[in-house]
Image (cartoon, rainbow, N blue to C red):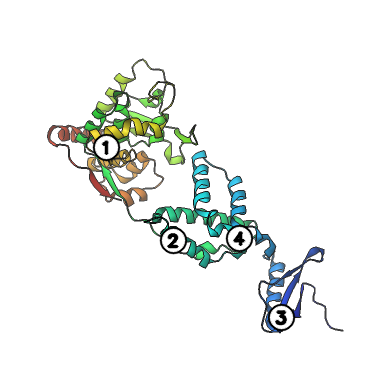
Amino acid sequence: MGRRRTFGSVRKLPSGRFQARIEIAGGDRIKAPETFETRKAAELWLSSQNVARAEGTWIDRREGAVTLAEYSESWLAGRLGRPSTLVRDRGYVERYIVGDRLGAMPIGHIQPRQIRAWIADLGARGTRGLAPATIAKAGQILGSILDQAVADRRIPSNPAVLVSWPKAEPLDLVVLTPAQIEELAAAIDPRYRLFVLLGCYAGLRAGELCALRVGDVDTLARTVRITRTLTEVSGHLHEGPPKTKAGRRSVPIPGWLAEEIGLALDGALVDDLVFEAPRGDGPMRLASWRTRYWRDATKAAGIPDFRIHDMRHTAVSLWIAAGYDARQIATWAGHSSVVSVFDRYGHLIPGQDTADLMDRLDALRAASLASAPAGKLVPLRQ
């Protein structure tokens, strides 16, 4: 009597090829994804599946029958994080992943070649295609979805790890001189003059400026404390802590700026917002504020391409010019590592005493205002 196979069987098909079938609990059988030229090849595949089951690594291929679009929805539903991040990721999934041919494929059928074709399609969209940074971000999210599919034992491995992604080209960052900062601060609505000055001299992010409260500013110590940020997601404002631990920080400001802030906030309560919506009825909504105030101000100052985030680049460039050390700059900018400072802004001069360097920054501004005419934006290669 022949030995009975307990994990599967092999049978010869009318075509002459051999089919291997795995037997699982309940009497169900799963066919191999392809047929084999010889019985021995079919039995070798069956043996490999048996070994995988013994090692606890065997994957039921039927679990991979769910489409990428369907599985992406469950991945999104299980996500935790900041509201802005969740909305951003859903936008990438809906625009670039599930609406594509890739989204209709069963996740168990996705191979590196299909992902490479998807990348090529994204690059060809529109007249100029999507930017490499956008494609890379979409690929990062796709990789996360497939990583979860591996963890859920729906697929044996992540095909995205075998794909090369487009690299984003370095951006031309722009920075302002102190004279240009004054022009922009003078051009904007007077209620937001300090918004420009704090952004350009303290390097606060836009969301941090919008969430800043009077009690966060210590004019005697000449520091600004960042403990929260404000984001707008789908028309709703969300206030919360900075995204990273490094984002919670205290940043020094020049003496002249501390004095100006003190005068502007005289009589305000500690819980009052430093910058309110135009009607004074709550926090600023940055998107509409940019349209109503920022764009006109940058045009009036002769710097229409200057972005709100470029104020941070301006602050860092001034800190570098004043001689601050890389670690201190990274701390003030809210970076967790000095690497990002070096990558974006190049070499830094070794630091000195903070109070002395703040005086040097005061002197740098005074000299620029006295002698440097306003000019074109200064490009700074990232």
Q: Which mark is residue 107?
A: 4
Q: Nearer the viewer, mark 1 or mark 4?
A: 4
**Structural distance between the alpha carbons of marks 1 and 4:** 58 Å
**Structural distance between the alpha carbons of marks 4 and 3:** 26 Å
Q: Which residue is mark 3?
A: 18
* Residue 257 horizontal/vertical position (percent): 27, 27
* Residue 72 horizontal/vertical position (percent): 58, 52
Mark closer to the chain start, 3 or 2: 3
Q: Which residue is mark 1?
A: 353
Characterize the local packing of mark 4: few (<14), some (14-19) or many (20 or more) Cα atoms within 10 angstroms.
many
Viewer-proximal residue among 307 and 124: 124
Mark closer to the chain start, 1 or 3: 3
Q: Residue, x 32% and y 33% (percent of image)?
A: 294
Residue furthest to the front in view is: 127
**Structural distance between the alpha carbons of marks 4 and 2:** 20 Å
Above or below, 112 against 277 in this view is: below
Q: Identify the secondary structure beneath mark 3.
A: strand
Mark closer to the chain start, 4 or 3: 3
Q: Quadrant of residue 199?
A: top left
Characterize the local packing of mark 2: few (<14), some (14-19) or many (20 or more) Cα atoms within 10 angstroms.
some
Q: Are marks 1 and 2 in contact (CB under 8 Å)?
A: no
Q: Amino acid at mark 2?
A: Trp
Q: Nearer the viewer, mark 1 or mark 2?
A: 2
**Structural distance between the alpha carbons of marks 3 and 2:** 39 Å
| Observer able to see residue 184 | yes
Q: Identify the secondary structure beneath mark 1.
A: loop
Q: Amino acid at mark 4?
A: Ile
Total labels drawn: 4
Q: Nearer the viewer, mark 4 or mark 2?
A: 4
Q: Nearer the viewer, mark 3 or mark 2?
A: 3
Q: Which residue is mark 2?
A: 165
